[in-house]
Amino acid sequence: MRLVVTDMDGTLLDDDKRAPAGLWEVLEQLRERGVLFSPASGRQYATLAREFAPAAQGMVFIAENGTYVVRDGVEISSDPLDPAVVAEIVAAVRRLSAGGADVGAVVCGKKSAYVERTDPAFLAEVRRYYVENRIVDDVTAVDDDILKVALYDFGSAERTTAPALAAFAGTHQVVVSGEHWVDVMNRTADKGAAVRRLQRELGITPAQTMVFGDYLNDLQMMDTAEWSFAMANAHPEVIRRARHLAPSNNDDGVLRTIRRVLGLPA
């Protein structure tokens, strides 16, 4: 094994967003064995770097659902959206909101995330995943490379927001990344594409790769590894796509599986 890639929410973290006990010990054991550990998340790079600060040196962060990959502060790859497409997505969200849907857009750039909506409930959700965030008058007018547009739906993202973005599905990725989140990215960008790029650059094969995921934005990642694990709490489609099943996120499924497969001491 040379590469371990894991989603964060619903996978490595429990339902209260807590990292499992023993995480730092396992990361050190992986480092000693020459195994690269890579968080792959819809979260922004700044958020992931802060969360893994004690072990961040040499770690590859697959951020923004694969649209931004960084190691030791150096960009490995990125896949920004066309600004005209960003404007079209934001216009669609504004129409959806005007029609009564409780939804807001987060325009995710390399420098920061940008929002127009300012109510405390929405900002609390944004700040959970985007450490670097700014409130602006117009999210389509920011000076930044935009990696994706994330939409937070206080109802069901799968039933309300995703169908409203169907017009973009033919040309872009429209991915339900959680119960309340939908991400719109370039068709060429997803976690699986980011993992494959990393494998090519480092000469790592699928047989040497282990991945963990729980939701629809993890589907493509399941195809990059012979050791692909869906969490027991995963979306049914992810369970069907993965080769193996891990214990749930609330049962420390990622660490338990890593220890078992690699023979690490508990």
Image (tube, grey):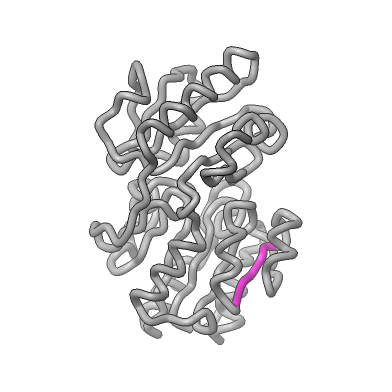
Front position in the image: 26 or 143: 143
Q: Where is residue 14 in the image (x, y as percent from the top left)?
A: 60, 53
Task: Describe residue 133's horizontal placement relative to residue 93 as left or right.
Answer: left
Q: In this view, does 97 lie above or below 223?
A: above
Q: In this view, does 231 lie above or below 266?
A: above
Q: Quadrant of the C terminus?
A: bottom right
**Identity of the residue drawn at 49% across and 22% down:** 91
Residue 19 on the magenta span? no
Q: Is residue 29 visible in this depiction of the protein?
A: no
Task: Describe residue 83's horizontal placement relative to residue 209 as left or right.
Answer: left
**Identity of the residue drawn at 41% across and 51% down:** 67
Instruction: Give the magenta-colored segment's residue range.
Output: 227-231
Q: Where is residue 82 in the image (x, y as percent from the top left)?
A: 37, 38
**Identity of the residue drawn at 39% across and 41% down:** 81
**Identity of the residue drawn at 68% across and 30% down:** 160
Front position in the image: 87 or 59: 87
Q: Where is residue 144 in the image (x, y as percent from the top left)?
A: 27, 36
